[in-house]
Image: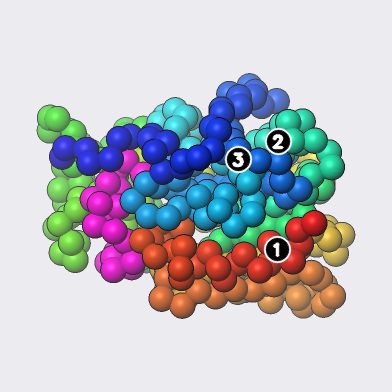
Amino acid sequence: MEREIPLYTLSGVNDAAISTHHFDTEDKLGLSLMRYYRDECKNVVVIIHGLTTSSDMFIMPEHENLVMFLLTHGFTDVWTFDFRMSNRHIYNLRPHRYSMDDCALYDHPAAIDLVRSVVGSDKKVHVICHCLGSVSFVMSLFAKKLTGVASVVANSVALTPRIPKWSLTKGKVFPFVLEYILDIPYVSPRWDDDPHWSRGKLIGKLVSLFHRECDVPACHMLSLMWGTGWPALYEHENLADVTHRRGGDLYGGTSLNYHRHVMMMVDNNNTAVRMYPDKAAHSSLPVNYFQYAAEVTTPVLFMTGANNRVFTDSNIVCYERLKELVPENPHELLKVEGYGHQDVFMGKNVAKDVFPKFMPFIEKHAA
């Protein structure tokens, strides 16, 4: 399919100085942040994507995106973080045993430290995070690996992953079949675009037989990779047509160990837990990420689309569980009607329908 919008384009952000900032993690991966700077600002915002996506989901040129919305609403120093789950890096395109514990321990604290080293210690840092970027960032926060974060907007899921029954079945079976039977290193929404017949292309064609809701093969594959629904990730009507068609670019391929970690959490009473409890390198992390809940004073807005078919009511349950554990905690809950998992950031009308709903939370905790 001919590309309509350039891959990894920065054209969705204008009137800002854009720079890339690289750093190495303690476990020896190279990661990167992008800075979109208009002017000095007392409140800096860092935005974090989910698994298989990237910073691109926040700078899409086909609608008023999150970075542009923030820049034009008083937050004139915005950063996006491409951590090890990003499709701008290569780390998902081979079998691996990285877990969200690695992201919590090595990626997020180092990224926040880098931002602070650039903007200065006198600035407030606010974080907006999504999907498994949200899970791993909130894990890092609740493991007390992060300090000085003024507020967090955590979308879709955080410390209590909950998924539909069909997703549970897929999550138990699909990683084993893909890696050990088919010997395929990763699953990709772009398999249908393979220039020759391959096992991936065949899987893509078979998946499309069961998804008659649209004619975009990447959309069908995304519903296999995440959630339960036709489609699973979003409401079709919330997306611009070009966004729907370029799903294979906005979401990359991924191997499936992060899925295994989600399954482990689901099996452990829908609770964020360490994937490898005996791994010495992770010994500074809590086995159960609710361990220090009473000590976390950073306010978190647990946000979810009301039609979430990927992580269902995960963030509602997380908010309620924290309220029961620590009745006087500073956290809040936001349910966005008419939206699902991904379209709260990637929908054509999000600047009108979604962003104004969580901005008061950030502004309340701004200087």
Residue at 68% of width from left, 62% of height from top?
362
Q: Is residue 27 left or right of residue 193?
A: right
Residue at 50% of width from left, 50% of height from top?
68
Amino acid type indicated by mark 2 = Val
Residue 363: which disc?
A: 1
Q: Characterize the local packing of mark 3: few (<14), some (14-19) or many (20 or more) Cα atoms within 10 angstroms.
A: some
> Does the magenta portion include 239?
yes
Q: Secondary structure beneath disc 3? A: loop
Residue 131 percent across, percent down from the top left: 52, 55
Residue 290 percent across, percent down from the top left: 76, 60
Residue 115: which disc?
A: 2
Tell me whether circle 3 and circle 1 mark residues in contact (CB < 8 Å).
Answer: no
> Mark 3 to mark 1: distance in Å?
19 Å
Q: Earlier in the sequence, mark 3 or mark 1?
A: 3
Q: Characterize the local packing of mark 2: few (<14), some (14-19) or many (20 or more) Cα atoms within 10 angstroms.
A: many
Foreground: disc 2 or disc 1: 1
Amino acid type indicated by mark 1 = Glu
Q: Earlier in the sequence, mark 2 or mark 1?
A: 2
Q: Quadrant of the N terminus?
A: top left
Foreground: disc 3 or disc 2: 3
Q: Is residue 329 left or right of residue 262?
A: right
Residue at 42% of width from left, 55% of height from top?
64
The coloring applied to the image is rainbow
Q: Which residue is mark 3?
A: 38
Amino acid type indicated by mark 3 = Arg
